[in-house]
Image (cartoon, rainbow, N blue to C red):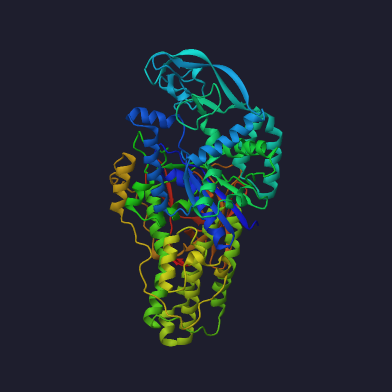
Amino acid sequence: MAERILVTAALPYANGQIHLGHLAGAYLPSDIYVRFQRLKGREVVFICGSDEHGVPITLTADKEGITPQAVVDRYHAMNKAAFEKFGMSFDNYSRTSLPLHHRTALEFFLDFHKRGILKEKKEQQFFDPKANMFLPDRYVEGTCPVCSNPEARGDQCERCGSYLNPTELINPKSKISGEVPVLRETSHLYFPLGEYQKKLESYIDIRNKRDRWKDNVLKYCQSWFKDGLQDRAVTRDLDWGVKIPLPGYESKVLYVWFDAVLGYISSTKEWSERTGKPDEWKKFWQDESTKYVAFIGKDNVVFHCIVFPAMLMAWNETHQQKYVLPENVPANEFLNFEGQKFSKSRGIGIDVQDFLERFPADPLRYYLASSLPEYRDSDFYWRDFQAKNNNELADILGNFVNRTLAFAGKTFNGVVPERGDITSLDRTILDALNATPTAAQKCFEEYRFRDALLEIMNLARAANKYFNDSEPWKTAKSDASRCATTINVSIQVARSLAVLMFPFVPSSCEKIWRMLALEGKAAEQSWDSAGSAVIPPGHKLGTTEILFTKIEDDVIEQAIRETTNQQPAPSATPKQVEEKPSITIDDFKKVELRVAKILECEPVPKSEKLLKLQVEVGTERRQIVAGIAKHYKPEDLIGKSVVVVYNLQPAKLMGQESKGMILAASSDDDGKLFVVSPLGEIASGSVVR
């Protein structure tokens, strides 16, 4: 693993506020990765900033009767504040309207122009005679030739998703004057992207073999290569952006796709100047030993995997100081909101700032991390957010830390007790503590952040089980040495969890650190130290506080009303329950119900309904096949505790042995199934009475 890492997160467009989908796409994954790498002691610079050029910004300015600069000033400040409140740990958050960025973008453009890389082409473009200006694509509206949508834009129809050329629109009109535009000849400069296709295919193949790229990213790139890369316009007729200092091009600016990706370089330069080391940026961008990772959403794959690398390749052809290309581009899919796409016009969704007015950042970070759209689209649901906060953060992580430190305060006067002889029970949790940093690290290095979180939370689950099984409230009276050992070990685990969970819930982990009264901060610790018991006996602990507050139902219901334009469904009228013959208690006792923990889960081949689960029931591992594939994704079930019929006669479903049955309930007419799960943390194998 490289010891110097450059991390960039996609520049958010300064034409609106960031929402939860943006966080799940590029920003939370990049922050998690950076925080982990810093704990590993690696030299990291984390770069982002506002993308402040382009037609949407000028349209907003025209609509509001203000300048484009006023628009970007507003949203840059709002989004920067939202990121800070969410806990993003950027080293620099810049903006592309800065003179430093303009100079950087022009350095690339003028170099390419001087070397004859750019090609001038004459073309027909719509012109508004009344406004006396050429119209960029989004300044033209008309009827979509594909679906007949009368409000299609010149670049894309939002109804059917078709990419368009303004000249393809039926009945086009100017958004400036409302008049019918005319076609006139204009000239633009083009970057010959197709000339770099073979180099790009080789580049991606090498990087994929070295640092395994996501399948969705590879497939997207392959589809572009299959169609053949085409020249892309570098200039456009607009008065907002990086002005072009060439004769005949005074009224044109750089196309935003060209200048925006160079914002990563200019932002790093700004960081370098701000920290008093003006050449430090070169160490990250122009040293081949640097590992560059670019975090984006899937809608930005072409720009970061194809366009930007091609631009850097073009620069590197003739310059001694060569730029590093992305080692990996771990793009996420989309996060939807309550089953629908985020839509400001329809009042669906919530901006980050608004969300953080309601709830702290860490519960949101945890929920999003547990449901990141790493390989397919996922959804934010308010009730799932509530359940994750209450049942996992509060009842598992918070419960373990609080009960451990509260017990130490009450029984040992807030001092870490001496550890006595180690039993097999102690050894099991200490082994888990030792193994978890390595297991989670593998997930982090492979950009599998959901799996990393699961590994760490499994340690917290095991810690609760250890505390329960050790029964220190009993041994405090019967065996003081055994009680002291239990609490000593539990405190060590609490410290480890503060380090391991830091990339996900940093504020809460610093709170644990203060409760433990340890020196420094959780952020300053070594990741590897989380695998050892390092707090000495006799250490004085701090004040114990509630780590996570549970969210009440009425608070979530209000959030649903205000962010989905829907009223919560009224309580359903109880259905008439079909009565079945009464059974005796002896009949009921024939059914053995036990708690099982799901270890693995995958679809059954050729079946739309069945999932194959490997479950732990106490010390036994067995396979169960359940007809819940239409209601749950396999990755959402791993690590969950469920109730199973333990003594059911084995059966075969689609050729797969099923030894048991998972209990599930259906509460509505559409047949939606809900797996029955224990309300609190309980050991697998426990009997349901």
Q: Which residue is nearer to you in this view: 467 or 551?
A: 551
Quadrant where the C terminus is found in the figure: bottom left
Left or right of residue 505, residue 562 in this image = left
**Percent position of residue 6, x then y:** 58, 51
Quadrant where the N terminus is found in the figure: bottom right
Q: Which residue is nearer to you in this view: 95 or 583?
A: 95
Q: Is residue 102 above or below residue 464?
A: above
**Percent position of residue 201, x then y:** 69, 37
Q: Which residue is nearer to you in this view: 406 or 593?
A: 406
Tell me if I can see residue 648 in this picture.
no
Residue at figure coordinates x 39%, y 70% from the top left: 402
Q: Is residue 237 above or below residue 554?
A: above
Q: Is residue 544 above or below residue 74?
A: below
**Percent position of residue 559, x then y:** 31, 47
Residue at figure coordinates x 51%, y 69% from the top left: 496
Q: Is residue 563 above or below residue 110?
A: below
Tell me if I can see residue 470 in this picture.
yes
